[in-house]
Image (cartoon, rainbow, N blue to C red):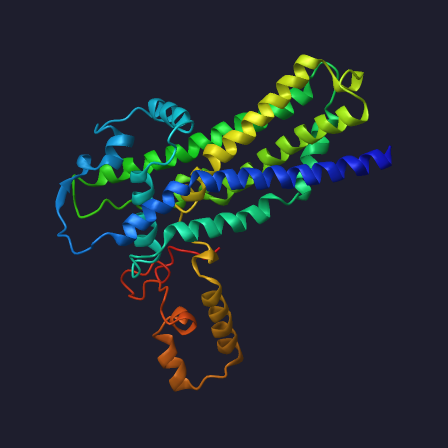
Amino acid sequence: AIHQLHIFIFVLAVTHFLLSAITVLLGIAQTRNWRHWETKIQENNDSAPQMIKHVQEFKFIQDHFKGHRKRSRIFGWMRSFFKQFYGSVTEEDYTTMRLGFIMKHCKGTPKFNFYSYMIRALEVDFKKVVGISWYLWAMLMIFLLLNVEGWYVYIWITLVPFIMLLVVGSKMEHIITELAYEVAQKHTAIRGDLVVSPSDNFFWFHRPKLVLLLIHIVLFQNAFEIAFFFWLLVTYGFKSCIMGKPAYVITRVVISVICQVLCGYSTLPLYAVVSHMGNSFKKTIFDDNVTEGLVNWAEKARRGTRTPNKITTDASSSPIDEANGGAVQMTNTRANSSVEQGTARLI
């Protein structure tokens, strides 16, 4: 029995890694149009005069706010629920959220490549998703201990992640709607482009990281369901009593596959952009050269190898400039720097 358990754990780990990798690759593939949007923004001529427009003339507001000053919370959640199944992120959504991120975290670099930063951050998050933490094993053991006849625990193990994924997707769509609503409430007319204000307040418990945790749980539960099915199929056969009723088995597998596809098709692309609508920015905002330069700069400061005059000189310049010749630069002015104001954190 212990040997069989070791085999199943190995199968589960491999299944979880493969399915997570496929899901993330599908999510990145869904963002291929975003690269073209980023390129178009980078090539846009900024010399055009800034015009004053009524806030309801912006397509981003029209798509999410429908031009009305009053809103129905129930209608907003219903719209967010269904929108995750089609066109979850439009060009107007991407452009507006990109500008909101830049104006909050790196206002001095309007040509910042938000798409590259977003993909690098998603790759880092993938390394967390493929892992199997202790709380996932603990949660799985609790489900198995509750496997009492008549409780249909295996059905719940399949349905709960699927429902959880739908709730997460609806919440991220609703965050985009909340960004539009906040701008529409505060302004009647705007000079230039529409700028939203990212904030942790839009997320559950003011924690954007919680979204990744929920996605991690969903992917692990799906991997368990699929790995368990194939392990029983190979070990005992489809008609074995331990497999359960065929109708239940097929239903569970189909729901797991749908959940996995939906996660890659809609939820992950939504997470890739909406997760940056908080107060924090991730360390992947710096490329490898800049990161190395920051580490060296901090190490020199700790060792106290600089002279007082040199410290004064270097304090006025960004360590990013020292590392990369100013290729990527955060806002340096005291009035506009979100880092100096304490509104941004590096995570």
Q: Is residue 198 visible?
A: no
Looking at the rendered structure, the number of numbered marks drawn on it comes to: 0
Q: Quadrant of the N terminus?
A: top right
Write down the quadrant of residue 83 in the picture. Answer: top left
> Closer to the camera, 164 or 262?
262
Q: Is residue 108 visible?
A: yes
Residue 98 position, x and y percent, is 33, 48
Residue 300 position, x and y percent, is 50, 78
Image position of 174 with respect to 340: above or below: above
In the image: residue 187, left or right of residue 327 = left
Image position of 297 with respect to 92: above or below: below
Write down the quadrant of residue 37 in the picture. Answer: top left
In the image: residue 77, left or right of residue 132 = left
Residue 233 position, x and y percent, is 75, 24
Write down the quadrant of residue 45 in the picture. Answer: bottom left
Q: Residue at x 29, y 48 (%)?
A: 40
In the image: residue 212, left or right of residue 313 = right
> Closer to the camera, 6 or 47?
47
> Closer to the camera, 61 or 33?
33
Q: Residue at x 40, y 84 (%)?
A: 310
In the image: residue 130, left or right of residue 41 = right
Residue 266 position, x and y percent, is 45, 33
Q: Residue at x 62, y 17 (%)?
A: 251
